[in-house]
Amino acid sequence: MPPSVDLLSVFGHILLLSLLAIGGAITVAPDMHRLLVGEMGLLSDVQFNASIAIAQASPGPNVLFVAVMGYQAAGLPGAAATLAGIMLPSTALALAAARWSHARRDWRAVRAFKAGMAPIVIALMFATGWILSAETPGWRHLLLTVAAAVLVSRTRLHLLVMIAVGAIIGGLGWV
Amino acid sequence: MTDETHSLARPSSEKELFVAFTLLALQGFGGVLAVAQRVLCEQKRWLTKEQFVEILAFGQVLPGPNVCNVALMVGDRFFGWRGAFAALAGMMAVPLVIVLAITAAYSQYASNPVVAGALKGMGAVAAGLIVGTALKLMSALRTNPVGIPACTVLLVSAFVAVAILRWPLVWILLGLGTLACLLAWRRLRADTAAAAEGG
């Protein structure tokens, strides 16, 4: 841990990034890299990539990668600074927007937004699956992805069972 | 769809929201969206598929983590700001402790081939879960005022733009999103006019 990390400055920079994170916190990963690895030199490239990998493998929202980066840079105070920075502005905005739109849910503009965005929201989910799957090529990996997709859409099999089977198959070196 | 709305339940307290979102988040390896859909729409029956897609639409266009925005809006819908923070805290508190513990232990296990393989397998399943959830949610489009043909065109174009062409999301939301909303706006006006004439 570097002895004198300017946490206030880290917090301030990430506060600004929060409102740019359209499509999820992961979209500001390149900016986080520029800030934490480049400008401030708080993390190495290896630590940066490991932070994203750890958050994706852990349960919970992927935004926690931001807390992992803060933790690696400056321990628990670092985690608090980065997580508060990324969450505060977007949370305030989301809450205000939810209130505004709920009060006006009968307006044609609000109904048009919800109806129009629905196919795009679903397309983004397909795209996320596609991009995640394309990161690791190989037909056995793809087969596992397709099997999970079919099972989740056609059966009520518990999602944790599917994740556990994936971990076992992967642990045995089959994918 | 009306039947589905009638059989909806609601959480009894902020505490139930907190516990539900904690359990939901703890099942979300490699993304919480698939679990959120299953728990909120199928197990708890707090939302219909249509409502889930609507809330997700706001979660997607607003900055910030999508699933956290969804938690906030679901909590707010039932118990105002107290519910919003109960749901968000449930989503984040316990997973935060776990992820930091894993980070502290990570360096010892990172190079272990079994661990690396297991992570790869979990990643493959996580990709499948989100695709399967998207397949399930497609049925919510049947009642969409935009209509099935236009929905199909929008869905395919957005997928190609994001997944294949890898265009920046902001431009896709601004471009295709605006087009889709204008189309919905026009269809809704036509529906209202038809309903007025019929009535």
Image (cartoon, coloured by chain):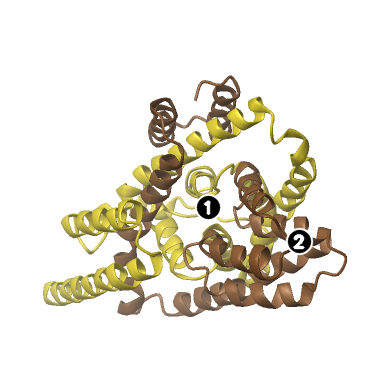
Chain colours: A brown, B yellow
Q: Which residue is mark 2?
A: A79
Q: Is residue B74 visible?
A: no
- Read off the chain for label 1: B
Label 1: few (<14), some or many (≥20) within 10 Å?
A: few
Whether label 1 touches label 2, CB < 8 Å: no
Labels 1, 2: front one:
2
Q: Which mark is residue A2?
A: none
Quarter of the figure that contains the N terminus of chain A: bottom right
Label 2: few (<14), some or many (≥20) within 10 Å?
A: many
In the rendered structure, which amino acid carries the disc numbered 2? Ala
Above or below B61: residue A62: above
Above or below A45: residue A31: below
- Residue B166 occupies quadrant: bottom left
- Residue at image position (62%, 41%) is A57
Residue B105: image location, x then y, percent: 79, 40
Residue B159: image location, x then y, percent: 31, 53
Both marks 1 and 2 on one chain? no
Give how far apart the Cα atoms at labels 1 and 2 are: 37 Å
The foreground one among B18 and A71 is: A71
Q: Which mark is residue B9?
A: 1
- Residue at image position (65%, 61%) is B88
- Read off the chain for label 2: A
Residue A7 is left or right of residue A148, and the answer is: right
In the rendered structure, which amino acid carries the disc numbered 1? Ala
Which element is circle 2 on? helix
- Residue at image position (49%, 34%) is B125
Residue B26: image location, x then y, percent: 65, 44
- Residue B10 occupies quadrant: bottom right
